[in-house]
Amino acid sequence: MRPVLSLILALAASPVAAGVDDAIDAHILPGYAAFAQATAVLNDAAGDCSADALRPAWNDAFDAWMGVSHLRFGPVEQDGRSVIMAFWPDERGVTPRALAALIADAGPIIETPAGTAQISVAARGLFALEYLLYDPQFAGADSGTSAYGCALVQALTLDLATVAAEVDDEWRETYAATLRTAGDEGNATYLSDREATQALFTSLLTGLEFTADQRLGRPMGTFDRPRPMRAETWRSERSQRNVVLSLRALSDLARHLSDGSAPLAEAALLRAVGLAEALDDPAFAGVVDPSGRLKVEVVQQAVRAARDAALAEIAPSLGVSAGFNSADGD
């Protein structure tokens, strides 16, 4: 795994609670509520489990996931929920094998929510559903030709909606207050205001790094060996859309954290969003061509420049500095 940023916080010159509160109220809680709602709609739509019927609701759910996918702390990290909801990158192609085994076995494990929760995380969540709705290997896994395939789709949509609702409920009922009361007596999760700010600023930086290194870097591969089929959600041709939505969400988080006091970082983020929007390469298939690869590389450079701008401008306003440690990352 490549090194990822870890943060070393210094004392802030001024309180940062306002930025934390704004991020919770205007970014985190609405984001998780939207994802829970979108997955509930997807689950309702699975009454007709054909691919054509479910694709719009699945895309809406994935759009909502992009609004919170960078928030890898709190309830979403408990019991591996983030991986359950979005198992990617799949370095070894585990998801199609796990799904194929389930369908071949046609066992009763998916007949109950408790049973579905026991299957491999690679066969659960948004990416497993993408295979079932878009990949030709599973073209028969819908209500038109396969009763078990339909039951599997319905089990996975219910499972996803359940996990999303759990995360949303825990944020609203307990975890938001835990983050707000950082440093208060009895708060064993965040011993100081600085630790709460660390969690949010880490989400911003690692979110930008994930988009640069994974969403853009994986399909780029090397100049001699581009890997377009390593792009996130290339089967559904929404790889570019994921980058755009993720960058918009990260821009929103940065704005709330900095309270509008980081114009250079905000401009750098908006530039990255604009370049991503202009790509016209939905699945990043264009990386096989040198000119297409260059366009994606320009976006990647802009995302990294936005990360650097956040370190240079937002970090001082929050009283943070960054160091580099070797750690496992996505």
Image (tube, rainbow, N blue to C red):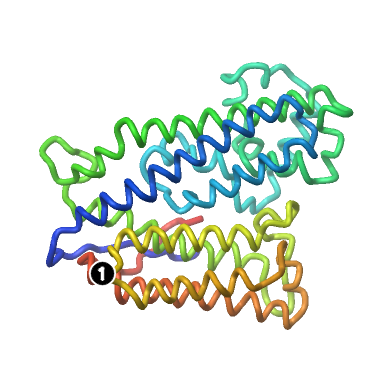
Q: Quadrant of residue 275?
A: bottom right
Classed neighbour count for the residue bearing mark 1: other residues with Cα under 10 Å, few (<14), some (14–19), many (≥20):
some
User: In this picture, is 257 found above or below 306?
Assistant: above
From this view, report whether residue 43 is shown above or below residue 265: above
Does 4 appear above or below 20? below
Residue under label 1, please give it.
Answer: 321
In the figure, is residue 256 to the left or right of 71?
A: left
Q: In x, y percent, where is residue 63?
A: 58, 49
Residue drawn at x 15%, y 64% is 12
Give the residue drawn at x 72%, y 24%.
47
Residue 198 appears at what percent x and percent y?
28, 57
Place of residue 288 in the rendered image (x, y in percent of width and height, measured from the top left): 77, 74
Total number of numbered discs in the rendering: 1
Which sits in the foreground, 209 or 92?
Answer: 209
Q: Nearer the viewer, residue 91 or 131?
A: 131
Q: Secondary structure at mark 1?
A: strand
Q: Amino acid at mark 1?
A: Ser
Left or right relative to 245: residue 291: right
In the rendered image, residue 9, in percent from the top left (x then y), is placed at 22, 62
* Residue at the (41%, 71%) spot, across then down: 307
Question: In the rendered image, which quarter is residue 276 located in?
Answer: bottom right
Residue positioned 73% across, 57% down in the render: 237
